[in-house]
Image (spheres, grey):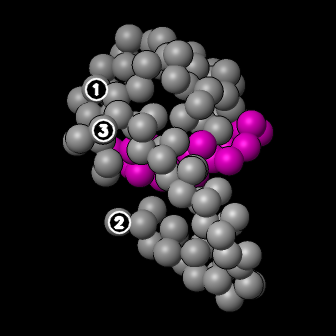
Amino acid sequence: RNQDKMVDMEEFKLMLRTPEIKAILTECQIDIIPEEAEDIFLVLFQRREPVSWAEFNCGLKLLTRYNNQASSKDIMLLEGQVVKLDRYLAPCSRIEIIDHMRSRAYLLQE
């Protein structure tokens, strides 16, 4: 929509309502309906603020990886619950946080 190379939640919702973009997402096996856009954005990026195009692209790649057996929303909500449970059960040391970040970065690179 604008040329700032950032994607915010409203732009994401608009994308999902655009037939050309919806067709591309369907071709990539990304199954998101516009009504789920806000939930997916929040779980995927952990914030409401705009994300860079590169970060958005990595998020979409993550959705395609898990989309064969469950909806994108199912996977993202499950991941969010696992992270919350992990934080509740074992307070993380700085080393554990760094390990988690490295693991997440590795997954996004695949």
- How many numbered tags mark residues here? 3
Q: Where 14 sits versus 108, above or below?
A: above
- Residue 35 versus residue 77: which sits nearer the camera? 77
Q: Main secondary structure of the magenta part?
A: helix
Find numbered disc 3 in the image and state the secondary structure of the residue it sits on.
Answer: loop
Q: Please, is residue 33 above or below residue 81 in the view?
A: above
The residue beneath circle 1 is 26
Dot label at residue 70: 3
Tell me where residue 47 appears, x and y as whole percent.
Answer: 73, 43
> Cα distance, mark 2 to mark 3?
20 Å
Front in this rendered view, residue 100 or 85 = 85
Determine whether, in the image, residue 63 is placed left or right of residue 7: left
The answer to whether residue 15 is visible is: no
**Quarter assignment of residue 85:** bottom right
> How far is mark 1 from mark 2, CA to CA?
21 Å
Image quadrant where residue 3 sits: top right
Q: Is residue 106 magenta?
A: no
Q: Residue at x 63, y 47 (%)?
A: 45
Query: Which amino acid type corresponds to the residue marked 2 in the rendered image?
Result: Glu
